[in-house]
Image: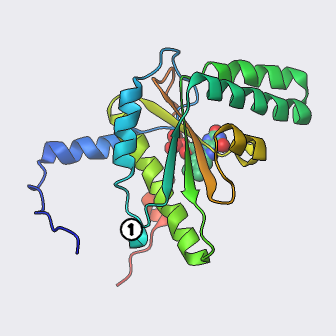
Amino acid sequence: MNEVLEVPEVRTVEGEAGMAEVIRSRRTIHDFREEPAPVELARKALDLARWAPNHHLTEPWRFYLLGRETASAIARLNAEIVTAKSGPDAGAAKLDRWSRIPGWIVVTCANTEDPLRSREDYAACCCAIHNFSLYLWGEGVGVKWTTGAVTRDPRFYDLVWIDPEAETVVGLVWYGYPAEVPNPARRPLEEVSVSLP
Ligand SMILES: Cc1cc2nc3c(=O)[nH]c(=O)nc-3n(C[C@H](O)[C@H](O)[C@H](O)COP(=O)(O)O)c2cc1C
C-alpha cells in the first residue's frame, strides 16, 4: 500500500498564476545560446520528470544524459543521413547547427508486448518529457523535443547504448538558454472542445 501524503496547502493565486504562465509561455526552442545550462539543472528536471503519471506505476522511462562525445557522434550520424537525402551542403549545414546545441538527453520507453500497456507507457513518457520541459522553462531554460529520422536509426541506438529489443526512443531532447523564442499560435479553445450537458 502506498503511503498517503496530506494534500499540500491550497496554492495562492500568485502560485497558480505562476504555473499558468509557465505552461502558456513555454515554447519549443530551435536556437540556443552557446553557453550550456548547468547539468545539475537538467538532473533536477529529470528527477521531476519521473514524477509524471504512469498507469500501474510501470515507470517506463529511461533517461540518458549525453556528454559532448556522444552528442558529436550523433551530430555526425545525422549529417550523414541528411547528406544521403539532401546532399553534402545540407549535411554540412546540419552538422554545424547540431554541433552548437548545448545540452542533450535521450528519453526512451521500456518495450512491452502488451499493446495497451505500450500505448499507456508511451503516454507516460511524454508526460515525463513535458515535466522536464516545464520545470526547465520555469528556470529560464528552453527545450526542443525531436523525433527526426536519426532517432530511429539503429546506429543511434548503438551510440546511446540502447538495446532496441528492450527500449524505444521517445525523443532526443535538447536544452539550453534560448537565443530566440518563437511564437506559434493555438486554435481557440472553442474550436477544439465540446461541453456536454
Ligand atoms: C512528439 C513530438 C515530436 C516532435 N518532434 C519535433 C521534430 O522532430 N522537429 C521539430 O522541429 N519539432 C518537433 N517537435 C516540437 C513541435 O514541433 C512543437 O511542439 C510545435 O511546433 C509547437 O510549438 P511549441 O512547442 O512552441 O508550442 C515535436 C513535438 C512533439 C510533442
- Three-letter amino acid code at the position of disc 1: Leu
Question: Is the CB of mark 1 within 8 Å of ligand 1?
Answer: no
Task: Please give left or right for residue 158 compared with residue 18 in the image.
Answer: right
Residue at the image position 31 percent from the left and 41 percent from the top? 21
Q: In this rendering, does residue 191 appear at all?
A: no
Q: Residue at x 69, y 55 (%)?
A: 164
Is residue 17 toward the left or the right of residue 146 in the image?
Answer: left
Q: Residue at x 63, y 23 (%)?
A: 69
Name the image quarter holding the C terminus: bottom left
User: Looking at the image, which residue sits at the far top?
Assistant: 35
Image height check: is 6 above or below 117?
A: above
Question: Mark 1 sits on what residue?
Answer: 57
From the viewer's side, name the closer residue of 168 and 173. Answer: 168
Mark 1 nearby-residue class (10 Å; few <14, some 14–19, many ≥20): few
Observer-nearest of 180 and 121: 121
Q: Position of residue 140 (x, y in %)?
A: 36, 28
**At which x and y percent is residue 152?**
73, 49
Q: Which quadrant does ligand 1 occupy? A: top right
- Asked which colour scheme the image uses, the reply is rainbow
